[in-house]
Amino acid sequence: MTTVGPDLDEGGAYSGPESDDLYREPPRHRGRRWFSVLAGVFLVLVLALLGLGWWVNRQVYPSKPGDAVELNIPAGSSTSDIAQLLKDRGVITNTEVFTLYLRFEGQGSFKAGTFQLFKHERYSRIVATLARPVVAVDHVTVPEGMTLAGIAQRVGQLPGRSAARFLELARSGQVRSDFEPAGADPSTGLEGLLFPDTYEFRRADDETVILQRMADRFDEVAADTNLNQLAAAQGVTPYQVVVVASIVEREAKVPGDRPMVAEVVYNRIKQAMFLQFDSTVVYALGPAFTGQVTKPDTQIDSPYNTYKNKGLPPTPIAAPGKASLLAALNPTPGPWLFFVVVDPSGKAAFAATFAEQTRNIQLAHSRGLP
């Protein structure tokens, strides 16, 4: 019986091909395996690059901007400093990508300033915004007839400003008006000498700058009215004109009555009469004023109580506007010594005698007016 098997020599040993050769992988198969490995590595690299590209693209072009932020770039800031500020404020999320973007775009030379940006902003918009520095400003409106303390409260509502600090400065004598009389008490020196207007201030402007601007604005407007020249025609000083104007500002309810109210003030002074204006009592009461002047209020001991003291109060009682200044400089000639509001519009009736005033008061009551 013939047996088919490996070749054996006389000793029974295998005499065929080497055993290692019997199991060696053909070269063709080894090449395929290396190709598969290289293909896998290449695929991983491609996917990594695609992922990196997608991530970088999301940094440069975020899908949606977020909340607005204010960015202050100090003078001398480097590109890396700016990138870090942007990251700290949430405008960007990666400083390295932003820095590389600036180099690629040939950007990076920005000026110091204050900028309005958005969180997760597109890089192109960030660069465009940083090329246009915007100075942050605050606005404050001072209405006619407001006291110094009231103005301080308005200023105190501005970011980073203090009402107490503003009032302290206004009463320190550090800032003065051209129309403040020599030797005026610093504690009340700028009362009525800050012009009522709407002001715009840089965020860096402190209380001293704000106070000086308001005082300078008053001096400018007062000079424009020829205050110094026209005051003499009324037989009073320029400062006394401001005091009269402050009373006119608080007493006249409609613009057309201002010159006539001013005439009443001058006429009563000339006749050595008590002015008897509730507005001066309200100023004297200050925070204690309840909204209605009562009989006991008219008896308080104060130099501003014109029911007990003849002549003008020692200082203005409010900030007069230009119209009231002009009225105090150009009163309407007439014999009037009294006036009372007789119309819901605020229009007053003027009288030269107490009997006329009494009839006007009765007319006001018949119309439901106090």
Image: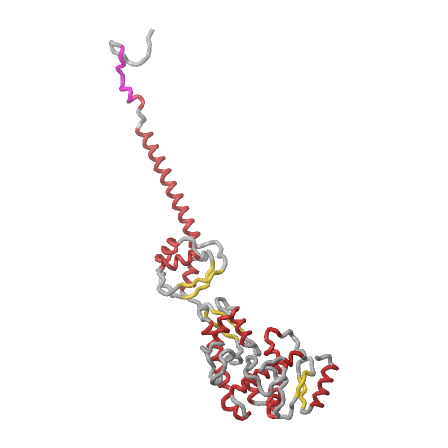
**Which residue appears farthest toward the front when viewing the image?**
301
Picture quadrant where residue 135 is located: bottom left
Could you say where residue 78 lies in the image, as x and y percent from the top left? Answer: 35, 61
Using the rendered image of the protein, determine whether residue 118 is visible from the camera's viewpoint: yes
Using the rendered image of the protein, determine whether residue 220 is visible from the camera's viewpoint: no
Is 262 situated left or right of 156 in this image?
A: right
Quarter occupied by the C terminus: bottom right
| Extent of the magenta region | 12-21
Asked whether 27 or 295 is in front, the reply is 295
**Which residue appears farthest toward the top when viewing the image?**
1
User: Does the stretch in magenta take in 169?
Assistant: no
Could you say where residue 9 lies in the image, as x and y percent from the top left? Answer: 25, 11
Asked whether 138 or 146 is in front, the reply is 146
Residue in view at x 36 percent, y 59 percent: 79
Q: Assign the magenta stretch its main secondary structure.
A: loop
Residue in view at x 36 percent, y 40 percent: 42
Above-or-below relation of 94 to 336: above
